[in-house]
Every structure is written in structure tokens, then in C-alpha cells.
Image: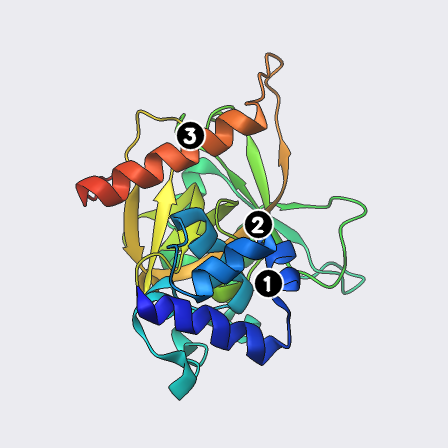
Amino acid sequence: MEKISANIRYLRSQEGWTQKELAARLDVKPQVIGSYEENRAIPPLPVIIKMADLFRMDISALVRLDLSKGKPQKKESLLRGKEVLAITVDIKGKENIEFVSEKASAGYASGYSDTEYIRDLPKMHIPNLPKSATYRAFEIKGDSMLPVRSGDIIIGKYLEDLSTITNGKTYIIVTKNDGVVYKRVFHKLVKDKLLLISDNRIYQPYVIEIRDVLEVWAFTGRLTLNEDEVELPQDRVLNLIAGKLITAFSEQKVGKK
């Protein structure tokens, strides 16, 4: 793991940070950074993920490449510009929030860029959302993301750059093969792929090719008519994610939802 040691030192110096400053960003002690840079200790996976997020690069590049010879540039395949996004506006010129019902989601992957298809979707307005973003509402099907249930509606904010995905957060992912899914997402773990994880542990994690991703919508809010809500404690969510990551990488298996 000599390359990652050298890369940590190189990237830190490029940012102009001291070991103490980098440690604060990674939530570790300064002496831990010293042990990484001197190759006396190997960063655990959660720390490597944080580093990849912090320096905005693939984990594979951080671990395997000599970054002093040139930091990898952001991949064009991660960009999903608004110029290909079909939207509608109201009579005041304000963007609508189109509602993609469970029934409509079956054809969304083929109609997402069709202005006529988008125009025919039901519209909704939610007050106090920032005007600088584009939003869409998706009805959820199934129980893979409990406590989110079938019939709940996820409000998503359009993501133009997939490199800004935050590991462990939830997103609506639209793909060529699977259509519309709502999952926790991890990127940079496998080159040019996204790892999708369900909160319901009976569903196995699986990976998808970034080139197959049509749209990504970051969770902004949820509308529900279910009264008997039971929220998962934060520590349980984190333990669940960690357990599924270990399973996904130790068994090297890809399961479908």
C-alpha cells in the first residue's frame, strides 16, 4: 500500500493542508495521518471512502496510481447536464415538479427525454424549495427501502454531476435496464460503477455501470400517507450500510433487487 501512503501526502500538500487539518476533515487524530503517510498503517475502508470524496476521485486511483504524475481528471461520463433534461413550466415561467407515478415509472426510462411524455405527467408544487434546482417526484414501489413504503413519494433534486454523489445517501436512479429505483448509493468503490444498497437487508446490494445511468435525483423530501412510521436509528443505519459493504466486497457477488 505504498502508493496510497504517497498519494495521501501528495494530495494533502497539493491542498496546502497540514496533517492536523486533513485529520479534522477525516475525523481522525493527526498522528493517524502521519502513520498513513509513513506507511506504518493502512487506512480502513471508511477512511478511504472519505478521502475519495474529499479529493473527488475514484478509490482505485487513490490506491493504485501514482498521483504525483498527474491527478486524474473528472470523467465526462459523470456529467448529466440539464441541456438533455425535459422540463415543463407553469404560466408564470416557474418549473413544475412532474409526478412520476408507479404506473408511469414503467415507461419513464424510455420517455424521460421526451418533452411530450414529460408534459403529460401530473404536476405538483411544493413551497419553499430553492428555485435554483430542478425537482421531480417519484412514487415508490416495494419495501426495499423501509421505512419508505409503497405509495410514498420521494421528491428528488436533479443531479448534473454524478461525482457529487455523497456515499451512503439516498437517490432516485434511472437506468436503461432497471428503470426507476430508490437506493443508497456508493460511488468510487468500483471504477465506472455505482453500488446500490437497500435499507431492507433481505435485498442484496448490486452494482450498475455509470454509462447505463440516465438520471440521478438526490433525496430532498418524502410525502407519505402512512401513519405507523418507525424511523431507523442513525447507528443502526450506519451499521447496516457497513455490514452490506463488507458482504458485497468479501463475497464479490452482485445480486439483483
Tag nearer the camera, 2 or 1: 2
For label 2, the crowd category at 10 Å Cα-Cα, with few meaning under 14, some 14 to 19 and many 20 or more, is few
SS class of the residue under badge 1? loop
Q: Can you tell which quarter of the image residue 66 is in?
A: bottom left
The residue at 39%/55% (across/down) is 41
Q: Which residue is more in the foreground, 158 or 170?
A: 170
Amino acid on which disc 3 is placed: Leu
* Residue 171 drawn above or below residue 81: above
For label 1, the crowd category at 10 Å Cα-Cα, with few meaning under 14, some 14 to 19 and many 20 or more, is many
Whether residue 184 appears in this view of the structure is yes
Amino acid on which disc 2 is placed: Val
Residue pointed to by mark 2: 28
Q: Can you tell which quarter of the image residue 198 is in?
A: top left
Residue pointed to by mark 3: 240
On the rendered structure, is 55 left or right of 95? left
SS class of the residue under badge 2? loop
What is the distance, in whole Å, between disc 2 and disc 3 at their CAs? Answer: 22 Å
On the rendered structure, is 95 left or right of 143? right
Tag nearer the camera, 1 or 3: 3
Amino acid on which disc 1 is placed: Ile
What is the distance, in whole Å, between disc 2 and disc 1 at their CAs? Answer: 44 Å
Which of the marked residues, 2 or 3, is nearer the chain's N terminus?
2
Q: Can you tell which quarter of the image residue 175 is in?
A: bottom left
Residue pointed to by mark 1: 87
Q: Position of residue 120 (x, y in %)?
A: 54, 52
Q: Position of residue 30 (x, y in %)?
A: 60, 56
